[in-house]
Protein backbone atom coordinates (compact mmCIF):
# COMPACT_ATOMS: atom_id res chain seq x y z
CA UNK A 1 0.00 0.00 0.00
CA UNK A 2 2.80 2.38 0.93
CA UNK A 3 4.56 1.71 -2.37
CA UNK A 4 1.36 2.48 -4.30
CA UNK A 5 1.08 5.88 -2.64
CA UNK A 6 4.68 6.72 -3.47
CA UNK A 7 4.06 5.81 -7.11
CA UNK A 8 0.95 7.94 -7.19
CA UNK A 9 2.82 10.92 -5.79
CA UNK A 10 5.52 10.50 -8.43
CA UNK A 11 2.92 10.47 -11.19
CA UNK A 12 1.33 13.57 -9.74
CA UNK A 13 4.57 15.48 -10.33
CA UNK A 14 4.80 14.69 -14.04
CA UNK A 15 2.48 17.47 -15.22
CA UNK A 16 4.52 20.05 -13.32
CA UNK A 17 7.70 19.24 -15.21
CA UNK A 18 6.32 18.79 -18.74
CA UNK A 19 3.18 20.90 -18.87
CA UNK A 20 4.83 24.07 -20.15
CA UNK A 21 5.97 22.04 -23.16
CA UNK A 22 2.57 20.48 -23.92
CA UNK A 23 0.12 23.31 -23.20
CA UNK A 24 -0.31 25.93 -25.95
CA UNK A 25 -0.67 29.06 -23.83
CA UNK A 26 -1.53 31.19 -26.86
CA UNK A 27 -4.82 29.32 -27.16
CA UNK A 28 -5.83 29.80 -23.54
CA UNK A 29 -8.52 32.34 -22.75
CA UNK A 30 -9.25 33.49 -19.20
CA UNK A 31 -12.92 33.13 -18.38
CA UNK A 32 -14.69 34.98 -15.56
CA UNK A 33 -17.50 33.66 -13.36
CA UNK A 34 -19.19 35.70 -10.65
CA UNK A 35 -19.64 33.67 -7.45
CA UNK A 36 -20.91 36.35 -5.08
CA UNK A 37 -21.64 40.09 -4.82
CA UNK A 38 -17.94 40.96 -5.29
CA UNK A 39 -16.26 37.54 -5.54
CA UNK A 40 -15.17 36.08 -8.89
CA UNK A 41 -13.39 33.03 -10.27
CA UNK A 42 -11.01 33.18 -13.23
CA UNK A 43 -10.26 29.97 -15.12
CA UNK A 44 -8.43 29.00 -18.29
CA UNK A 45 -10.05 27.41 -21.32
CA UNK A 46 -11.08 23.78 -20.97
CA UNK A 47 -9.68 20.95 -23.06
CA UNK A 48 -6.16 22.38 -23.45
CA UNK A 49 -4.35 21.40 -20.26
CA UNK A 50 -3.37 17.70 -20.03
CA UNK A 51 -3.55 17.74 -16.23
CA UNK A 52 -6.69 19.89 -15.91
CA UNK A 53 -9.16 18.99 -18.63
CA UNK A 54 -11.88 21.19 -17.13
CA UNK A 55 -9.71 24.34 -17.12
CA UNK A 56 -6.15 25.27 -18.09
CA UNK A 57 -4.02 25.76 -15.00
CA UNK A 58 -5.33 26.60 -11.56
CA UNK A 59 -8.43 28.65 -10.87
CA UNK A 60 -7.95 32.16 -9.50
CA UNK A 61 -10.14 33.91 -6.95
CA UNK A 62 -10.75 37.65 -7.05
CA UNK A 63 -12.33 39.88 -4.42
CA UNK A 64 -12.96 43.35 -5.85
CA UNK A 65 -14.30 46.61 -4.49
CA UNK A 66 -13.42 50.10 -3.21
CA UNK A 67 -10.69 48.75 -0.92
CA UNK A 68 -8.81 47.24 -3.86
CA UNK A 69 -8.35 43.72 -5.17
CA UNK A 70 -7.42 40.51 -3.38
CA UNK A 71 -6.32 37.58 -5.54
CA UNK A 72 -6.08 33.87 -4.82
CA UNK A 73 -3.22 32.26 -6.77
CA UNK A 74 -1.42 33.61 -9.84
CA UNK A 75 -1.54 30.90 -12.55
CA UNK A 76 1.25 30.06 -15.00
CA UNK A 77 3.58 32.98 -15.68
CA UNK A 78 2.86 32.57 -19.42
CA UNK A 79 -0.75 33.61 -18.71
CA UNK A 80 0.03 36.54 -16.39
CA UNK A 81 -0.86 39.28 -18.87
CA UNK A 82 -4.16 37.59 -19.73
CA UNK A 83 -4.98 37.14 -16.04
CA UNK A 84 -4.21 40.80 -15.34
CA UNK A 85 -6.47 41.86 -18.22
CA UNK A 86 -9.28 39.72 -16.80
CA UNK A 87 -8.82 41.26 -13.35
CA UNK A 88 -8.90 44.74 -14.87
CA UNK A 89 -12.20 43.95 -16.58
CA UNK A 90 -13.61 43.30 -13.11
CA UNK A 91 -11.99 46.20 -11.30
CA UNK A 92 -9.33 48.77 -12.11
CA UNK A 93 -8.26 49.30 -8.51
CA UNK A 94 -4.91 48.34 -7.00
CA UNK A 95 -4.12 44.65 -6.52
CA UNK A 96 -3.30 44.75 -2.82
CA UNK A 97 -3.06 41.13 -1.73
CA UNK A 98 -2.26 37.74 -3.26
CA UNK A 99 -2.55 34.49 -1.31
CA UNK A 100 -1.28 31.13 -2.58
CA UNK A 101 -3.24 27.93 -1.95
CA UNK A 102 -0.09 25.82 -2.51
CA UNK A 103 3.27 25.86 -4.30
CA UNK A 104 2.59 24.26 -7.70
CA UNK A 105 3.43 26.42 -10.69
CA UNK A 106 -0.11 26.64 -12.06
CA UNK A 107 -0.89 28.47 -8.80
CA UNK A 108 2.33 30.41 -8.09
CA UNK A 109 4.43 30.95 -11.23
CA UNK A 110 2.84 34.36 -11.80
CA UNK A 111 3.67 35.60 -8.29
CA UNK A 112 6.59 37.83 -9.29
CA UNK A 113 4.50 39.45 -12.01
CA UNK A 114 1.73 40.38 -9.59
CA UNK A 115 4.20 41.47 -6.92
CA UNK A 116 5.35 44.05 -9.49
CA UNK A 117 1.72 45.20 -9.72
CA UNK A 118 1.89 45.96 -5.99
CA UNK A 119 0.45 42.78 -4.48
CA UNK A 120 1.61 41.71 -1.02
CA UNK A 121 1.94 37.92 -1.10
CA UNK A 122 0.69 35.70 1.72
CA UNK A 123 1.27 31.94 2.09
CA UNK A 124 2.13 29.17 4.50
CA UNK A 125 5.61 29.11 6.02
CA UNK A 126 6.17 25.69 4.45
CA UNK A 127 5.37 27.03 1.00
CA UNK A 128 7.95 29.79 1.28
CA UNK A 129 10.55 27.35 2.61
CA UNK A 130 9.98 25.14 -0.43
CA UNK A 131 10.38 28.11 -2.77
CA UNK A 132 13.66 29.05 -1.11
CA UNK A 133 14.93 25.49 -1.62
CA UNK A 134 13.92 25.63 -5.28
CA UNK A 135 15.86 28.88 -5.67
CA UNK A 136 19.02 27.06 -4.56
CA UNK A 137 18.70 24.32 -7.19
CA UNK A 138 21.01 24.28 -10.25
CA UNK A 139 18.08 24.92 -12.63
CA UNK A 140 16.55 27.70 -10.54
CA UNK A 141 16.96 30.37 -13.23
CA UNK A 142 14.52 28.55 -15.49
CA UNK A 143 11.90 28.00 -12.82
CA UNK A 144 9.52 30.94 -12.24
CA UNK A 145 8.42 29.48 -8.89
CA UNK A 146 12.03 29.89 -7.70
CA UNK A 147 12.10 33.64 -8.46
CA UNK A 148 12.67 35.44 -5.12
CA UNK A 149 10.56 38.35 -6.37
CA UNK A 150 7.57 36.03 -6.09
CA UNK A 151 8.24 34.69 -2.61
CA UNK A 152 5.58 35.35 0.05
CA UNK A 153 6.45 38.27 2.30
CA UNK A 154 3.91 37.40 5.00
CA UNK A 155 3.70 33.80 6.16
CA UNK A 156 1.72 31.84 8.74
CA UNK A 157 1.66 28.34 10.19
CA UNK A 158 -0.98 26.04 11.58
CA UNK A 159 -3.43 27.70 13.95
CA UNK A 160 -6.23 30.20 13.66
CA UNK A 161 -7.02 31.56 10.19
CA UNK A 162 -5.49 34.80 9.00
CA UNK A 163 -8.31 37.29 8.44
CA UNK A 164 -8.42 40.12 5.93
CA UNK A 165 -11.21 42.68 6.25
CA UNK A 166 -11.89 44.49 2.98
CA UNK A 167 -14.68 45.32 0.54
CA UNK A 168 -17.35 44.56 3.15
CA UNK A 169 -16.08 40.98 3.32
CA UNK A 170 -14.13 38.85 5.78
CA UNK A 171 -11.57 36.64 4.05
CA UNK A 172 -10.10 33.73 6.00
CA UNK A 173 -6.79 32.12 5.05
CA UNK A 174 -7.28 28.69 6.62
CA UNK A 175 -4.12 26.56 7.04
CA UNK A 176 -4.62 22.87 6.23
CA UNK A 177 -2.52 20.05 7.65
CA UNK A 178 -0.23 18.25 5.20
CA UNK A 179 -2.42 17.02 2.36
CA UNK A 180 -1.86 17.87 -1.32
CA UNK A 181 1.41 19.52 -0.24
CA UNK A 182 2.88 20.50 3.12
CA UNK A 183 1.75 24.13 2.68
CA UNK A 184 -1.93 24.09 1.70
CA UNK A 185 -4.36 26.91 2.46
CA UNK A 186 -8.11 27.11 1.96
CA UNK A 187 -9.60 30.58 1.51
CA UNK A 188 -13.10 31.35 2.70
CA UNK A 189 -15.20 34.43 1.94
CA UNK A 190 -17.51 34.53 4.95
CA UNK A 191 -20.31 36.76 3.69
CA UNK A 192 -20.36 35.39 0.15
CA UNK A 193 -20.15 31.83 1.56
CA UNK A 194 -17.50 30.87 -1.02
CA UNK A 195 -14.55 28.56 -0.38
CA UNK A 196 -11.45 28.25 -2.59
CA UNK A 197 -9.50 25.05 -1.86
CA UNK A 198 -6.79 24.93 -4.53
CA UNK A 199 -6.01 21.26 -5.20
CA UNK A 200 -6.84 20.11 -1.67
CA UNK A 201 -9.81 18.33 -3.29
CA UNK A 202 -10.19 17.38 -6.94
CA UNK A 203 -13.46 16.51 -8.67
CA UNK A 204 -11.84 13.76 -10.73
CA UNK A 205 -9.22 11.07 -10.32
CA UNK A 206 -7.31 10.12 -7.18
CA UNK A 207 -6.01 12.69 -4.68
CA UNK A 208 -2.59 14.10 -5.60
CA UNK A 209 -0.14 13.89 -2.72
CA UNK A 210 3.06 15.63 -3.71
CA UNK A 211 5.76 14.00 -1.61
CA UNK A 212 8.53 15.98 -3.31
CA UNK A 213 7.34 19.22 -1.69
CA UNK A 214 5.60 17.69 1.32
CA UNK A 215 8.01 16.05 3.73
CA UNK A 216 5.35 16.28 6.39
CA UNK A 217 2.82 14.67 4.08
CA UNK A 218 5.29 11.82 3.56
CA UNK A 219 5.62 11.29 7.30
CA UNK A 220 1.86 11.45 7.74
CA UNK A 221 1.19 8.85 5.06
CA UNK A 222 3.90 6.52 6.35
CA UNK A 223 2.46 6.71 9.85
CA UNK A 224 -1.07 5.96 8.65
CA UNK A 225 -0.26 3.25 6.09
CA UNK A 226 -0.23 -0.39 7.21
CA UNK A 227 3.08 -2.24 6.76
Image (spheres, rainbow, N blue to C red):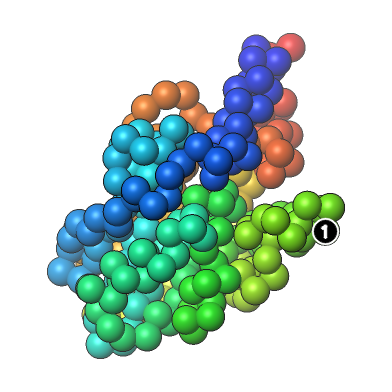
Left or right for 141, reference 192: right
Looking at the rendered image, the quarter that the C terminus falls into is: top right
| Viewer-closest of 214 and 162 | 214
Q: Is residue 212 visible?
A: yes
State the image coordinates of residue 176 (x, y, percent, origin top left).
Answer: 53, 50
State the image coordinates of residue 11 (x, y, percent, origin top left).
Answer: 60, 26
Please identify the quarter of the rendering in which residue 143 is found: bottom right
Q: Is residue 180 visible?
A: no
Residue 48, compared with residue 72, is above or below; it is: above
Residue 196, compared with residue 36, is above or below; it is: above
Residue 101, compared with residue 98, is above or below; it is: above
**Mark 1: few, some, or many residues within 10 Å (few <14, many ≥20)?**
few
Residue at image position (37%, 58%) is: 60
| Viewer-closest of 121 and 92 | 92
| Viewer-closest of 185 and 131 | 131
Furthest-left residue in this view: 37
Please identify the quarter of the rendering in which residue 211 is found: top right
Helix or strand or loop: what does disc 1 sit on?
loop
Left or right for 31, reference 164: left
Looking at the rendered image, the quarter that the N terminus falls into is: top right
| Viewer-closest of 23 and 222 | 23
Residue at image position (66%, 20%) is: 7
Residue 180, compared with residue 121, is above or below; it is: above
Total numbered badges shown on the rendered structure: 1
Residue beneath disc 1:
136
Residue at image position (37%, 27%) is: 204
State the image coordinates of residue 197 (x, y, percent, origin top left).
Answer: 41, 49
Amino acid sequence: MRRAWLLLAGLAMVPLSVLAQTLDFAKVEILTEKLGPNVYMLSGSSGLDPSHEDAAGGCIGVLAGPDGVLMIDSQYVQLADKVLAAVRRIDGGPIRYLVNTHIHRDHTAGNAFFAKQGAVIFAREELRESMVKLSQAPNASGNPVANPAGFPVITYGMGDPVRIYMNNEVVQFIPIRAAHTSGDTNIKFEKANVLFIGDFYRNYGYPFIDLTTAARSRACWKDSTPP
